[in-house]
Image (cartoon, rainbow, N blue to C red):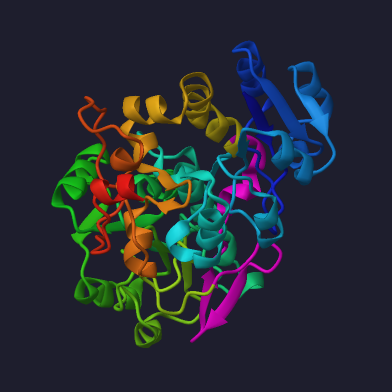
């Protein structure tokens, strides 16, 4: 098969989803690797390194799409690429389908086989760890007086107190942020809806970290004395409420900081709107907001190395076994299947965009097979299910 690596064109995105190391492995498996020139340059990987690993360097994205069986990059398919998609081609990238109806329509119209990478990680994406750790550091930068913040030092200085930080969500992202802030001496409270998660964190940090059940009431109690809030909650799509609404910003002191790492429109923070690395902050009700969508892109070398290593098994499985067998053997890859030759296979997207959907197992013809299990990627459920019998009839 032909593996095609694109240069990401999203504003402020500098990562690459395959380094020369992964290219060498793919070529060693007997496949052809095409790499768009400059794909890894911003992440610290030169074209010459890819060529030495066995890749053929090509000039344009058009050529990658035209010649490749599997096309991959880090971020969403951009509108300029929609017309390049080819029927039966395999796409592996962070589609974020529920939030991008036009992208989904282009995928369905082109009848490609599309995987959304963010749902494919069995042990959590390295990008989530990177977002948590780097997001915490970006929050500290936002706290600086020169950026509109309170001007507090994280651990305090002399007789001056350090920062009080509230982390919403104790999952992979929240724990990563906690590890950085705790090491730097911040006074941290973690909120989560899972008591087991909170107990685990209390034991891990020997009860030197405060933990609380996450409710709007508990958040409101802490906001007046909180210097920085990090939102690490994966908010269910379609919810109309918030953990922190605009009225609650008035509870926070002037120069306080909100870092919305989750970066969801209609997410847990009502005052959120997406920003970029070039213009990362805005101030609302005196509160500094940092809402960059691709925080890991700021540390492109480290995140590229970690991320590429984490998705290489998926690439090898698809290339060596084919889509059907790869999905049968790996439940996390199977649940990340977003569209298959004109059929939507992503339940959350179906629910939010009112589109019909089919189960990946049905469209792939895996009934009766013993499959590797995986939990659902989200809790959102759709009523627009198409039974397997109707797929066959179609």
> Which percent across, then down, holds residue 273?
53, 74
Q: Is residue 61 above or below residue 55?
A: below
Direction from residue 273 to residue 243 in the image, left or right: left
Q: Is residue 102 above or below residue 205?
A: below
Direction from residue 93 to residue 180 in the image, left or right: left
Q: Can you tell which quarter of the image residue 168 is in?
A: bottom left
* In the image, residue 284 lies in the stretch drawn in magenta: yes
Q: Is residue 157 above or below residue 3?
A: below
Visible in this render: residue 162?
Answer: no
**Which of these two is toward me, 322 or 77?**
322
> Which percent across, then down, holds residue 253?
43, 80
**Which of these two is toward me, 18 or 175?**
18
> Which percent across, then down, holds residue 212?
20, 60
Q: Residue at x 26, y 36 (%)?
A: 374
**Which of these two is toward me, 69 or 273?**
69
Q: What span is in magenta?
A: 274-302
Q: Is residue 192 above or below residue 197?
A: below
> Which percent across, then down, holds residue 41?
78, 38
Visible in this render: residue 2?
Answer: yes
Q: Can you tell which quarter of the image residue 224 is in?
A: bottom left
Q: Which of the image's four quarters has the N terminus?
A: top right
Q: Can you tell which quarter of the image residue 38 is in?
A: top right
**Which of these two is toward me, 272 or 50?**
50
Direction from residue 370 to residue 364 in the image, left or right: right
Direction from residue 97 to residue 66 in the image, left or right: right
Q: Residue at x 55, y 66 (%)?
A: 102
How many labels were placed on the picture?
Answer: 0
Q: Residue at x 70, y 59 (%)?
A: 11
In the picture as drawn, the residue positioned furthest to the front comes out as 393
């Amino acid at each position: 098969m032909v593996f095609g690596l694109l240069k990401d064109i999203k504003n402020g995105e500098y990562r690459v989803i395959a380094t020369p190391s992964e290219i060498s492995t793919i070529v060693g498996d007997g496949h052809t690797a095409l790499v768009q020139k400059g794909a890894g340059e911003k992440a610290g990987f030169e074209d010459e390194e890819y060529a030495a690993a066995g890749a053929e360097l090509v000039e344009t994205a058009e050529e990658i799409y035209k010649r490749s069986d599997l096309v991959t990059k880090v971020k969403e398919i951009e509108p300029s690429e929609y017309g390049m998609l080819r029927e039966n081609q395999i796409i592996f990238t962070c589609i974020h389908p529920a939030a991008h109806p036009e992208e989904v329509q282009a995928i369905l119209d082109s009848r490609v086989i599309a995987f959304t990478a963010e749902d494919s990680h069995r042990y959590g994406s390295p990008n989530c760890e990177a977002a948590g750790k780097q997001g915490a550091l970006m929050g500290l930068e936002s706290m600086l007086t020169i950026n509109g913040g309170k001007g507090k030092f994280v651990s305090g200085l002399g007789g001056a107190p350090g920062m009080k930080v509230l982390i919403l969500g104790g999952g992979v992202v929240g724990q990563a942020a906690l590890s950085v802030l705790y090491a730097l001496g911040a006074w941290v409270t973690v909120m989560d809806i899972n008591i087991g998660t909170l107990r685990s964190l209390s034991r891990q940090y020997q009860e030197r970290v405060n933990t609380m059940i996450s409710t709007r009431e508990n958040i409101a109690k802490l906001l007046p004395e909180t210097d920085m809030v990090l939102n690490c909650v994966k908010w269910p799509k379609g919810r109309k409420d918030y953990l922190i609404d605009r009225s609650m910003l008035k509870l926070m002191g002037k120069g306080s900081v909100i870092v919305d790492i989750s970066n969801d429109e209609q997410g847990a923070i009502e005052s959120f709107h997406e920003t970029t690395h070039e213009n990362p902050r805005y101030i609302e009700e005196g509160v500094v907001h940092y809402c960059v969508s691709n925080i890991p892109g700021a540390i492109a070398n480290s995140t590229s190395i970690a991320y590429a290593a984490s998705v290489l098994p998926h690439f090898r499985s698809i290339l060596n076994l084919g889509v059907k067998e790869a999905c049968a053997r790996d439940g996390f890859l199977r649940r990340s299947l977003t569209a298959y030759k004109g059929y939507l296979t992503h339940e959350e997207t179906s629910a939010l965009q009112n589109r019909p959907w089919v189960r990946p197992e049905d469209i792939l013809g895996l009934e009766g097979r013993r499959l590797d299990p995986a939990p659902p990627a989200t809790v959102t459920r759709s009523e627009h299910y198409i039974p397997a019998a109707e797929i066959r009839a179609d």
